[in-house]
């Protein structure tokens, strides 16, 4: 199934994407830890099915899903900068909501540039992670 691409022309400053909601499982954290070779004890179970902390770097997955939703990323762009801000902690089994917004959209030096900020919070509104991505959008 081919997805429509999220193009530069579709976005505008102030555009808010639909919230992305998820509940991260221990299995997902374990896959992430193996993929990143992270062996920090904070993220590993001491007992079977015990909730563990979600690694902050894993928040990029929620962030990307929050602005792409059911769309595809056009090929050929690149990240200019990315900033992670860890505001709190979350554990597996907790509901997380990521809301993203286009902060900047402009052209410079023949490049289409976008800045998107995503905030992951719990249902009570407590901020957990904030990611700011500045990218050159391919089309």
Image: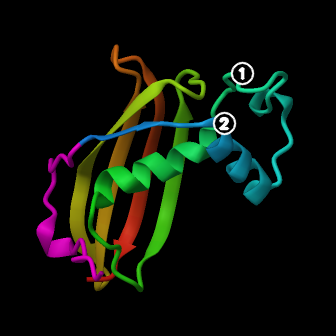
The location of residue 9, given as percent across then percent down, is 13, 74
Q: Quadrant of residue 57?
A: top right
The location of residue 93, given as percent across then percent down, is 54, 26
The location of residue 65, given as percent across then percent down, is 38, 54
Q: Is residue 97 left or right of residue 27?
A: left
| Numbered label attached to residue 50 | 1
The location of residue 66, given as percent across then percent down, is 33, 50
Q: Quadrant of residue 41?
A: top right
Q: Secondary structure at mark 2?
A: helix
Vertical arrangement, residue 92 with respect to residue 30, above or below: above
- The stretch drawn in magenta includes residue 101: no
Label 1 and label 2: CA atoms lie apart by 8 Å
Q: Identify the image quadrant of the N terminus.
A: bottom left
Q: Identify the image quadrant of the C terminus.
A: bottom left
Residue lying at the far top of the rendered structure: 124
Mark 1 touches mark 2? (CB < 8 Å)? yes
The residue depicted at 35 percent of the width and 73 percent of the height is 73
| Numbered label attached to residue 26 | 2
The residue depicted at 66 percent of the width and 36 percent of the height is 26
Q: Is residue 113 left or right of residue 32?
A: left
Disc nearer the start of the sequence (1/2): 2
- The stretch drawn in magenta includes residue 10: yes
Given residues 24 and 38, the one toward you in this image is: 24
Given residues 32 and 121, the one toward you in this image is: 32
Magenta extent: 1-18
Vertical arrangement, residue 131 with respect to residue 97, above or below: below
Q: Secondary structure at mark 1?
A: loop
Magenta stretch, main secondary structure, is: loop
Q: Residues within 10 Å of mark 2 (few under 14, many from 20)?
A: many
Q: Is residue 12 left or right of residue 66?
A: left
């Amino acid at each position: 199934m081919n997805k429509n691409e999220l193009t530069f022309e579709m976005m505008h400053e102030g555009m808010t994407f639909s919230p992305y909601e998820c509940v991260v499982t221990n299995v997902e954290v374990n896959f992430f830890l193996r993929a990143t070779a992270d062996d920090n004890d904070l993220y590993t179970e001491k007992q079977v099915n015990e909730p563990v902390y979600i690694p902050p770097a894993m928040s990029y997955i929620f962030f990307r899903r929050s602005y792409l939703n059911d769309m595809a990323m056009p090929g050929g762009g690149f990240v200019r900068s990315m900033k992670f801000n860890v505001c709190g902690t979350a554990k597996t089994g907790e509901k997380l909501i990521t809301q993203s917004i286009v902060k900047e959209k402009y052209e410079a030096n023949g490049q289409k540039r976008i800045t998107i900020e995503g905030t992951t919070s719990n249902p009570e509104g407590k901020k957990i992670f904030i990611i700011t991505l500045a990218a050159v959008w391919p089309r």
